[in-house]
Every structure is written in C-alpha cells, then in structure tokens.
Amino acid sequence: QVQLVESGGGLVQPGGSLRLSCAASGSIFSVNIMGWYRQAPGKQRELVASITSGSSTTYADSVKGRFTISRDNAKNTVYLQMNSLKPEDTAIYYCNANIFNTRYTSRHYWGQGTQVTVSS
C-alpha cells in the first residue's frame, strides 16, 4: 500500500504565502509524475502544477509566476510554494502521484486533501 500525506494548508490573507508538502510512503519502487490539484466549492477539480522525476514542470495559467512546484526524490516528497495568494486560490488542494509499486506496474494515488483559505 502507498500513502500520500499532505501538510501545510491553512488560512492566509490575500498577498500572503503558504507552502504545501506531500510525502509518499509505503510500497514504492519509484515515483514518476507528482502534482497538485485543487477543487473549489461547486467547481471541478483542476490541475495546479505537476513535476516529472526529471523536474520538468507544468503550471495552470492562473498560477504561473506565483506558485512553484518542486520535489525531493530522495524523500518521495513534492512541495508547492504559493506566493501572492488570491481569494480565488481558496480550495482543497490534493496531491497526486504516479507510483510504480514494482518495476512494471504503476497507478495514480491521491492524498486526503488540505484546505487553503485566502481571506482577509
């Protein structure tokens, strides 16, 4: 079994910063793409940012220049540094990872979600 454990959410004022972390543990052979998604009330879950094992990154247009995704392959951990936060960034943020349990088999795993609220 594999677990993704997220941390770092909370309440922040507009213009503030937060750093999310997500650590993968369990039966892991290797970790491929890791990413962050978010879901606001009444909206569909959307990709925020992703990073490959080689550190190539992708960002949603709405967060480019404000958010930075990074990872520590030795710790199987992905981070999301969020700066210049806006009220519209308020959502539950979910970690996702494509993990190989063996050399040949992989699947996507989700974290439990962490609430980010941007409000004055």
Image (cartoon, grey):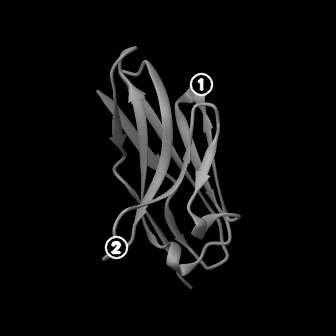
Mark 2 touching mark 1, by CB under 8 A?
no
Where is residue 64 shown, x and y percent of the image? 65, 63
Where is residue 110 shown, x and y percent of the image? 35, 45
Secondary element at tag 2? loop
Q: Residue at x 55, y 41 (%)?
A: 78
Residue 70 lies left or right of residue 25; in this view the side is right
Residue 90 lies left or right of residue 107; in this view the side is right
* First along the sequence among labels 2 and 1: 2
> Label 1 belongs to which residue?
74
Q: Is residue 92 above or below residue 110?
A: below
Q: Residue at x 36, y 16 (%)?
A: 104
Q: Which residue reaches farthest right?
A: 65
Q: Amino acid at mark 1?
A: Ala
Where is residue 18 shown, x and y percent of the image? 60, 61
- Snapshot quadrant of residue 55: top right
Q: Amino acid at mark 2?
A: Lys
Label 2 and label 1: CA atoms lie apart by 35 Å
Q: Residue at x 58, y 46 (%)?
A: 79
Q: Is residue 50 above or below residue 119?
A: above
| Residue 43: numbered disc | 2
Secondary element at tag 1? helix
